[in-house]
Image: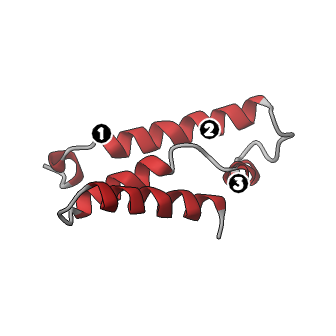
Amino acid sequence: MTDMIERVAVAINQAMLLHDDYDPDLLARAAIAAMRDCTPAMLDAGSAAHPAGGYVRETLLNDIIECEWRAMVDAALTETNSTTKGE
């Protein structure tokens, strides 16, 4: 199991244990929140796909990729129904 899959699986399991009723939104939010911090494999993949090319770990490009990823995850967690449905 990859680091991210394990992280998401644990988050979903914890959400299910803490809440008696089945709530798909709660489980989805738990999964998204678990993905907030990049794994080393994600940073490597993001760097390889970046237009500036690869990087040496711990460089500015690594920081940019991580900040962008966190911003996207945070945005997904703060979206409302009206923003996701295009209303």
Q: Spatial distance from mark 3 to mark 1, Cα to Cα? A: 27 Å
What kind of element bears circle 2?
helix
Which residue is identified by label 3? 49
What kind of element bears circle 3?
helix
What amino acid is labelled 2 in the image?
Glu
Which residue is identified by label 1? 78
Q: Position of residue 50 (x, y in %)?
A: 70, 48
Front residue of 7 and 42: 7
Which colouring convention does the figure follow? secondary structure
85 to 72, vertically: above or below: below
Residue 66 image label: 2
74 to 48, vertically: above or below: above
Residue at image coords 80%, 31%: 59
Front residue of 46 and 9: 9
Q: Quadrant of the N terminus?
A: bottom right
Q: Is residue 21 left or right of residue 63?
A: left
Q: How many marks?
A: 3
Q: Are marks 3 and 2 in contact (CB under 8 Å)?
A: no
Residue 36 image label: none
What kind of element bears circle 1?
helix
